[in-house]
Image: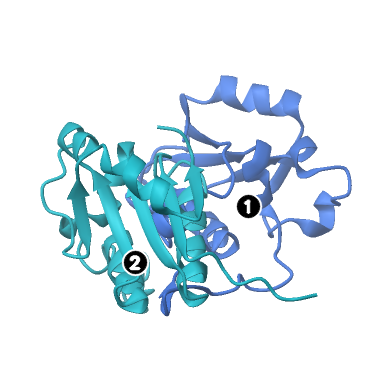
Amino acid sequence: MARRDPPKRFFLGMMGTPYRDETVTTLFRLADAAIAAGSHVDVWCCGGSVHLADASLGAEKPRDISQIEEPSPAPSTAALVTALARRGAGAFQWNICRYCAEEHGVVAPVPEARIRPSLHFVKLMSEADVSLILGRK
Amino acid sequence: MKDRTPEPACLAIIEAGVRGIVEEQFANIIWLSLILRRMRLPLDILLCRDAAQFALIRPAPASTLMIAGTSVATPRYEADIERLQAAGARVYVVVEDLGPEIDAGRALVSGVVPIDRDAAASLIAGARKAWYW
């Protein structure tokens, strides 16, 4: 049986609230796998997920104060967004809904993330070969 | 000199299982309980529902989670429970929530106390303060 080519464009909508379950982990792993397969990936964040790419999160989480002598490396979600963008090399874009960004007080995401007009959600989803919405707003 | 630490009287009930690995990483709810305990908050833990799985000995260390070539710290529930106990906290687990195939006598992290639902109700009723995480 002939092997199917991976979809050219993925659209991953992230509507779930961070910290509640494993949806954000799933999002990052899906995006990483799609990039590795050579696909273009657009992530769209609404609701509480708009803060995942906040520059104020820094590169790493606060230090593990229970293990000062042997801290665990723990990249922030913003650092992971940057890492995905580097791996994607132009084939990955992290998009933040402007309406949600204003509602949640997002002012400065990392440079690899863009605050986009809300209607852009429909445009990006329509352009994708595969669209998947994770969670609920 | 008398120990000024009061007897453990608060009970934190942890019900939701694996959650927020990427967001929390090392700073999961068991870890936070450890930090609070080390700050001398008298705190015991009751693991129930999906979070009962935290009390089980893992057959192997958690696999490494890599995202875009970046290593993500995965939770170390077992080690954190052991450190929590070393800090003086008692850790209870509702045995019915472990599932019928689990032998609580062999599968639990050392020191974790298996209790049934009726005993859990008594434990909550007897706590000075009890809350859900």
Viewer-closest of A77 and B121:
A77
Q: Is residue A11 visible?
A: yes
Q: Residue at x 16, y 64 (%)?
A: A111
Does residue A1 sit above or below B14 in this rendering?
Answer: below
Q: Residue at x 63, y 73 (%)?
A: B61
What percent of the width, then of the height, locates residue B48?
A: 65, 37
Q: Residue at x 68, y 50 (%)?
A: B53
**Is residue B61 shown left or right of residue B83?**
right
Q: Which residue is mark 2?
A: A92
Given the image, what chain letter belongs to the residue carrying mark 2?
Answer: A
**Residue B10: mark:** none
What percent of the width, then of the height, locates residue A27?
A: 47, 55
Rendering quarter of residue A63? bottom left
Given the image, what chain letter belongs to the residue carrying mark 1?
Answer: B
Q: Amino acid at mark 2?
A: Phe
Q: Which residue is mark 1?
A: B54
Q: Amino acid at mark 1?
A: Phe
**In the image, which lettered chain appears cyan?**
A
